[in-house]
Structure formats: C-alpha cells, structure tokens
Image (cartoon, rainbow, N blue to C red):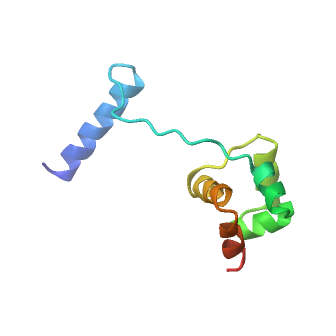
C-alpha cells in the first residue's frame, strides 16, 4: 500500500471516530500533574522549576493555577519527577 493511501485511510478513520461512527482502537489518558505539590515537595521556587524545565515562570504559574495543563514532553517529565524526585536535580544540573 502506498503512503498516500495509508494516510488517506487513517484520516478517513479519524473522521469516522470523531463523528461517532467508530470507536478508537485505544485511548491513552494521563493524570494531570499537580505542579505546585511537586514543586513544594522539592522545596524549590517557581523560577527554579521553570529554569530546569526550560519554560517560563508564567507557564509554571498557569499550571499551578490550573489555567493550563502540562502536555506532551512536559507532562512526561513532571510525571517522572513526581515518581523520582532525584530526577529533577539531575535535570536542573544540566
């Protein structure tokens, strides 16, 4: 099967799922990290967390206020830090 045909089938399937005609084969859910709790557990400032994660203090504030949720790589890194707080210090050192 050509790449174009595979992409076309995939998009048609996505539209069918979106319209309720088909159920997705799998759905992945991630728990939303409690950024304030993680930061308090580490006993660090918003600025220290922002610097280690390569983001802005405003982003950290938005996550803590629940105006925005960490997604993608940030969500995975926060989950890793929550499970293994020592990872934060390794991340901050680089």
Compared across the picture, whether 54 is left or right of 45 comes to left
Identify whether 61 is placed above or below 11: below
Quadrant of the drawing holding the C terminus: bottom right
The structure residue drawn at horizontal position 77% and vertical position 40%, both measured from the top left corner, is: 66
Foreground: 18 or 36?
36
x, y percentage for residue 19? 40, 21
Residue 64 on image: x %, y %? 80, 47
Q: Position of residue 5 (x, y in %)?
A: 19, 44
Instruction: Quadrant for residue 82, please give it.
Output: bottom right
Residue found at the far left of this picture: 1
Quarter residue 11 falls in: top left
* Residue in the foreground of this view, choosing between 36 and 71: 36
Q: Does any portion of residue 54 appear in the rendered image?
A: no
The residue closer to the viewer here, 7 or 89, is 89
Figure label count: 0
For the point 65% across and 42% down, the residue is 32
- Residue furthest toward the bottom? 94
Give the left or right position of residue 39, taking residue 29 as reference.
right
Quick check: 5 above or below 53? above
Q: Does residue 75 appear anywhere in the picture?
A: yes
In the image: residue 21, left or right of residue 69: left
| Position of 2 relative to 42 (above/below) | above
Residue at the (73%, 46%) spot, across then down: 34
Q: Which residue occupies 80% across, 57% down?
A: 41
x and y percentages locating residue 68 in the rendered image:
72, 43
């Amino acid at each position: 099967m050509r790449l174009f045909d595979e992409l076309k089938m995939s998009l048609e399937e996505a539209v069918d799922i979106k319209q309720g005609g088909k159920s997705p084969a799998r759905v992945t859910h991630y728990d939303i990290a409690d950024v304030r709790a993680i930061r308090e557990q580490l006993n660090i400032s918003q600025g220290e967390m922002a610097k280690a994660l390569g983001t802005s203090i405003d982003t950290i504030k938005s996550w803590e206020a629940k105006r925005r949720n960490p997604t993608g790589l940030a969500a995975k890194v926060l989950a890793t830090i929550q499970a293994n707080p020592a990872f934060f210090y390794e991340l901050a050192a680089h």
